[in-house]
Amino acid sequence: MSAAGAIVTKRVYDPATADDGFRVLVDRLWPRGVSHERAALDLWLKDVAPSAELRVWYDHRDERFAEFTRRYLAELATNAALEQLRALVAEHARTTLVYGAKSPRNEASVLAELLGGAEG
């Protein structure tokens, strides 16, 4: 839980619910097979996502998650979109970081931990 409220993560393929609060897609690519209506997003903040090179390298391989996290945090250190996300989190009682990956070990989980929440 952050000072502003809860930060949670949720797969875009799971139904949106009223208690999701402000929904932000944090993937660089739009999730396959999901309409904009079904995604029910308040914002698509693709600039906060990992670089294409890092995303391809990670390939959601569990044994690479620690190194992925280290590299992604290094990218975020100079990422203006992270400050935009921090401001949005501060404005809302609950923010849901939405992602498309099957694995919950992804950029949304890294962002949630970085921003002070890890529910979801």
Image: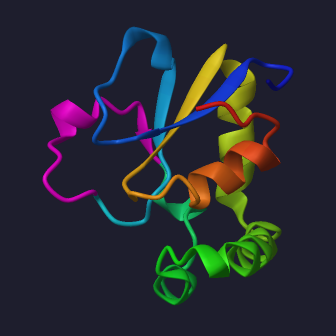
Q: Kindly give the residue lying farthest to the front in the view shown.
A: 63
Name the image colouring. Answer: rainbow
Residue 87 location, quadrant: top right
Q: Is residue 56 left or right of residue 13?
A: right
Question: Is residue 39 highlighted in magenta?
Answer: yes
| Left or right of residue 59, residue 58 in this image | right
Where residue 59 sits in the image (x, y, percent)? 47, 81
Residue 48's spot in the image, x, y percent? 59, 60
At x 55%, y 82%, the residue is: 58
Q: Is residue 18 above or below residue 20?
A: above
Instruction: Give the total of numbered labels.
Output: 0
Above or below, comparing residue 99 to residue 107 in the picture = above
**Of the pair 88 and 13, the residue shown nearer to us:** 13
Q: Quadrant of residue 64?
A: bottom right
Residue drawn 17% across and 32% down?
37
In what quadrant of the picture does the C terminus appear? top right
Quarter of the picture containing the N terminus is: top right
Q: Is residue 1 left or right of residue 12?
A: right
Give the answer, above or below, for where 69 lies relative to 83: below
> Height in image: 45 above or below 85?
below
Residue at 64% of width from left, 80% of height from top? 63
Q: Is residue 11 left or right of residue 84?
A: left
Q: Is residue 73 magenta?
A: no
Q: Residue furthest top?
A: 18
Q: Position of residue 71 (x, y in %)?
A: 74, 80
Q: Which stretch appears magenta?
A: 31-44
Name which residue lies at 74% across and 40% down.
86
The percent coordinates of residue 74 (x first, y second) are 80, 76
- As drawn, the residue found furthest toward the right would be 3
